Image (cartoon, grey):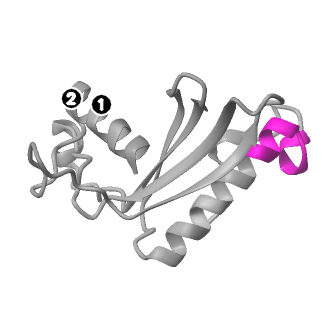
Amino acid sequence: DALLIDIITRRQQSSSMFQMSKYHSDTVRFIPNFYYNLISASGDGLDVTLVIVFSNKEKMIMQSSQSSNNKKKLPAALGVVIKFSIFNQSYDELKWVQHPSCEDDSSMKQWCNSLALNWRMKECGVGVFCLEQGTMKNDTWVGK
C-alpha cells in the first residue's frame, strides 16, 4: 500500500497528467484497487522487480488538452514496472503501461500476471522474446 501511495503521490505532484482523487486530503489517502506481482529478485535478494497495476476508476490520469478534443477514452487501468531496493527503500520506475478496458478485479489480476510473465520472459530471452529485435516489437505485446 505504502509503495503505491508514494508512486501515485509523486506522479500527482510532478505531472499534470495525474490529478488527486476527490477523496484525497491531508489525513486521507485514496488507494485504488490494485494487484502486484514479483517478477524477479537479485542474487542477494536486496533488489526486486515488481509490476503493480491499479484501477483508474477515479480518473486519476487526465487527458491532455490535445487528446480531449479527440474524445479518447481514458485508460481503465494503469500499470508500472519498478525495480525496488529493499536495503534503502528506493525504487526506479522502469515502464508505465495502460489498459483500455481492464475494469473488474479478475481481468486486472490476469493483466498483472500477464505483464509479469512477459517482463520475465523478456529478461530471460525466452518465448516470443528470443526472436531478434527487428523481427517483432516486443515491448507492445502484453497479453490480455
Number of numbered discs visible in the structure rendering = 2
Residue 29: where, in percent of width, then height? 21, 50
Residue 59 appearing in the image:
yes
Q: Which residue is mark 2?
A: 13
Are dots 1 and 2 in contact, CB under 8 Å? yes
Judge left or right: residue 61 versus residue 124: left
Q: Secondary structure at mark 2?
A: helix
Residue 49: where, in percent of width, then height? 65, 38
- The numbered mark at residue 10 is 1
Q: Residue at x 45, y 68 (%)?
A: 102
Q: Is residue 60 above or below residue 87?
A: below
Q: Residue at x 73, y 50 (%)?
A: 118
Under mark 2, the amino acid is Gln
Q: Is residue 143 above or below residue 122?
A: below
Q: Quadrant of residue 67?
A: top left
Under mark 1, the amino acid is Arg
Judge left or right: residue 10 versus residue 22: right
Q: Which residues are magenta?
A: 120-130
Membership of 36 in magenta stretch: no
Residue 134: where, in percent of width, then height? 81, 31
Membership of 121 in magenta stretch: yes
Mostly what secondary structure, the magenta segment?
A: helix
Q: Residue at x 11, y 47 (%)?
A: 27
Judge left or right: residue 66 versus residue 121: left
Q: Is residue 86 above or below residue 121?
A: above
